[in-house]
Image (tube, helix red, strand yellow):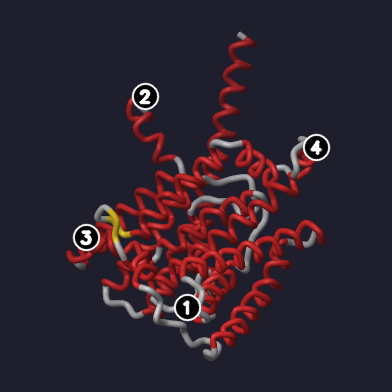
């Protein structure tokens, strides 16, 4: 193959490049089915419907790169939202109430990280248990505002509601917040020793222990960042819906886990990029929006999305496996060629 063509196609050989192609194809296909889908104003404005998932997925990607996982993110979203709502309903300034909501989320992250480090148990088991603990706390706390378990707390100030629904410089605030978060986590993972150490913990835990840095500190920081991301998403969802509910995060777990995996982050740790997670957030979000534009019901969208995700995840495994085989074959041919040259 011509060297120039090889250089041009090289980015597409990466998983992130394949995701960009998938994103472009789905936008063109859904645009052909319904031209209104391609309206730039509608397309950009619709990102507020799904980018809160990406804000949770960015720090969760770091946890999964260390070889961990956090199943309790949905309950932390609910806990942050209902603590904010209850504090506001009891007379606290809305911005101080937001600080209280984020503090509750960080405390939940501290419980997760501390329990995992102290017990040495599998992170999935620990966070599966805290998922029910935090969800139960959220329901219990909602009673302090004299509302039933899943009744929303409304009447939130316009300035707060505007965060999730307003625009800045012509762009949705949710999109701008996600952009800032993506830059921060890109620098954190790819440009700092923290990111390199997090990858090493996932790739080779034994080597990480003998490398001299604090594995516990990196692990705990990962869970705190994930809880903070979930807390911020809880506030954004509360603002977007203009209502604080104890079950507001009940449906975020599987979409967030899915887009992290689709973004190329290994479930076994050590591999992945923030760029892949960012692109995956748009792939999943526009896929679901396009299916609704095509006239599908919510249940049909769920079935079609799940099928597509299984297919993409399988493609991810197949391409990785094929790439590894290709590298091994090329190495064997090179060794054979060198052996022939030496023999002659």
Question: Would you name the residue on which mark 2 appears?
Answer: 3
- Disc 4 or 3, which lies upstream in sequence? 3
Q: CA distance from mark 4 to mark 3?
A: 53 Å
Element under disc 1 = loop
The residue that disc 4 covers is 210
Residue 203: % across, % down: 68, 43
**SS class of the residue under badge 2?**
helix
Between discs 2 and 3, the one toward the N terminus: 2
- The reply to whether dot 3 and dot 1 touch (C-beta < 8 Å) is no
Residue at image mark 1: 244
Q: Is 260 in front, or is 133?
A: 133
Residue at the image position 42 percent from the left and 68 percent from the top: 305
Say which of 298 and 104 sits in front: 104
Residue 218 in the image, given as x and y percentages of width and height = 69, 47
| Residue 76 - label | none
Q: Residue at x 64, y 74 (%)?
A: 134
Q: Which residue does the numbered mark 3 point to in the structure image?
A: 41
Q: Is residue 76 left or right of residue 163?
A: right
């Amino acid at each position: 193959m011509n060297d120039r063509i090889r250089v041009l196609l090289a980015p597409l050989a990466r998983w992130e490049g394949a995701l960009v192609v998938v994103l472009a194809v789905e936008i063109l296909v859904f645009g052909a089915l319904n031209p209104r889908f391609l309206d730039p104003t509608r397309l950009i404005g619709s990102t507020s419907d799904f980018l809160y998932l990406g804000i949770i997925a960015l720090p969760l990607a770091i946890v999964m790169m260390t070889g961990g996982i956090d199943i309790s993110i949905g309950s932390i979203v609910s806990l942050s939202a209902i603590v904010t709502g209850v504090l506001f309903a009891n007379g606290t300034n809305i911005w101080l109430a937001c600080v209280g909501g984020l503090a509750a989320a960080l405390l939940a992250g501290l419980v997760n990280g501390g329990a995992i480090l102290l017990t040495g148990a599998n992170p999935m088991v620990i966070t599966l248990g805290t998922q029910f603990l935090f969800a139960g706390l959220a329901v219990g706390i909602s009673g302090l505002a004299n509302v039933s378990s899943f009744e929303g707390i409304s009447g939130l100030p316009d300035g707060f509601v505007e965060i999730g629904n307003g625009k800045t410089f012509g762009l949705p605030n949710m999109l701008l917040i996600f952009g800032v978060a993506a830059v921060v986590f890109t620098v954190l993972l790819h440009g700092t020793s923290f990111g390199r150490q997090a990858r090493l913990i996932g790739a080779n835990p034994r080597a990480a222990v003998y490398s001299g840095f604090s594995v516990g500190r990196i692990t705990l920081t990962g869970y705190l960042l994930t809880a903070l991301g979930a807390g911020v998403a809880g506030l954004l969802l509360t603002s977007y819906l203009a209502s604080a509910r104890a079950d507001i995060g009940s449906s975020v777990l599987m979409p967030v886990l899915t887009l992290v995996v689709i973004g190329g982050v290994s479930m076994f740790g050590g591999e992945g990029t923030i760029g892949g997670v960012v692109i995956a957030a748009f792939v999943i979000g526009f896929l679901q929006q396009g299916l609704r534009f095509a006239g599908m019901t919510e249940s049909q969208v769920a079935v079609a999305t799940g099928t597509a995700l299984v297919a993409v995840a399988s493609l991810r495994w197949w391409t990785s496996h094929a790439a590894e085989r290709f590298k091994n074959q090329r190495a064997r041919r090179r060794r054979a060629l060198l052996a022939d040259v030496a023999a002659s």
